[in-house]
Amino acid sequence: MHTAPSQNMRAAVVTRYGAPEVVEVCTLPRPALGDTDVLIRVCATTVSSGDARVRGRRVPEGMGLLMRLALGWSRPRNPILGTDCSGVVEAVGAKVSRVKPGDAVVAFTGATMGAHAEFVRVSGAAPIAPKPARLTHGEAASLLFGGITAYHYLHRAAQLAARDRVLIVGAAGAVGSAAVQLAHLAGAHVTAVCRSVNHARVTGLGADAAIDYTRDDFTRGEARYDVIFDCVGATDYAACAKALAPGGRLLRAVAGLGAQLAAPFQGRLSGHRVIAGVTPELQTDLDRLMALAASGALRPVIDDTLGLEDVVAAHRRVDEGHKRGNLVLLLDPR
Ligand SMILES: NC(=O)c1ccc[n+]([C@@H]2O[C@H](COP(=O)([O-])OP(=O)(O)OC[C@H]3O[C@@H](n4cnc5c(N)ncnc54)[C@H](OP(=O)(O)O)[C@@H]3O)[C@@H](O)[C@H]2O)c1
């Protein structure tokens, strides 16, 4: 079937699991629009730790088979990665009335991915919200992946309270930099764990104290925390138990299958809770995040902004494991 050139798009395509170099920029047909779909012209998206995990087939222990079944056996079923975007609605299906062409929006594509392209199709039922006018598309996109994860863990899972003592491990990354801000905004006392080169940055986001994990081990210190949020999979309950206050919660954004199954039963005798698992991307949480961003309370943290042609460099940077906040891919600088 002939496809008119104007109906094509550029996209970053992963042809097999592997190193950053398996990502290629190609020209493909734009996604077809169904009655319940929204087609978004992507202005900005991010290359997240999640994208790099899928590309490199690097999954937490015990999750390899599940991931291959869910995402594709020898290559991602959808070769276009990317789970978040900020852009402009290009077209809507006949049954969609919540947004209209021309609306500036942020959205999650979820497990179907596809946002590392000039156009992405999302379900009309997907989390979609107006882009806060004060933010550029790059800034708005940078708030999504880490923001929704941090919001889910701190507010929904741990039910964070004002004056809780919160320790955030991996505070300089995408999830961590959002978590520092959200915990600070909730009135918690925040201790950030990251290398000292990042301490000024995390205190600027609201951390009250910072620990350099290359020099000090918080699990051996005297301080006690109501919430320990391990954003990067650096610790576990056995190591953290002593550092948790009575009623304390350990949040594990990265946990293997065994750890996820064990989490509901761990710490009970000590009055602790361990929470792990995949973050659901909920419309209500996206709306709250965007309200915080619209007021200026939640601020973008951007490691670098690159073009689609630089997508391999973006994956390399994420693979280093030391990005500060978010890696933005800018497709349309409007
Ligand atoms: N459960 C879920 O639904 C969910 C959702 C989103 C993400 N995740 C997972 O969460 C993890 C973090 O995601 P992310 O996007 O925040 O990653 P990221 O942005 O790539 O994290 C990079 C940061 O990790 C820090 N770091 C590395 N090793 C550390 C250590 N041992 N202790 C403390 N900090 C360390 C680095 O800080 P320094 O440079 O200071 O070392 C760097 O700033 C990923 O593995 C991702 O797959 C899970």
Image (cartoon, rainbow, N blue to C red):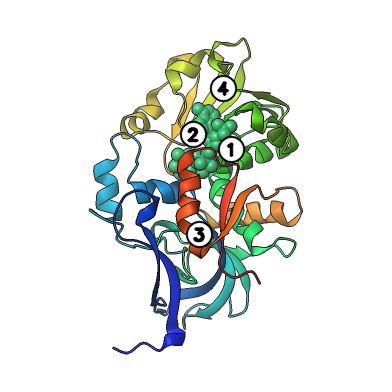
- Residues at marks 3 and 2, CA–CA distance in whole angstroms: 25 Å
Q: Which residue is mark 4?
A: 213
Q: Quadrant of residue 177?
A: top right
Q: Are marks 1 and 2 in contact (CB under 8 Å)?
A: yes
Q: Are marks 3 and 4 in contact (CB under 8 Å)?
A: no
Question: What amino acid does circle 2 point to?
Answer: Val
**Quarter placement of the N terminus:** bottom left
| Disc number placed over residue 310 in the picture, else none | 3
Question: What amino acid does circle 3 point to?
Answer: Asp
The yes-or-no answer for disc 1 within 8 Å of ligand 1 is yes
Question: What amino acid does circle 1 point to?
Answer: Gly
| Secondary structure category for the residue under label 2 | loop
Q: Residue at x 68, y 30 (%)?
A: 199
Q: Which residue is mark 2?
A: 232
Q: Which residue is mark 1?
A: 176
| Secondary structure category for the residue under label 4 | loop
- Residues at marks 1 and 2, CA–CA distance in whole angstroms: 8 Å
Instruction: Give the mark nearest the N terminus, 3 or 2.
Output: 2
Question: What amino acid does circle 4 point to?
Answer: Tyr
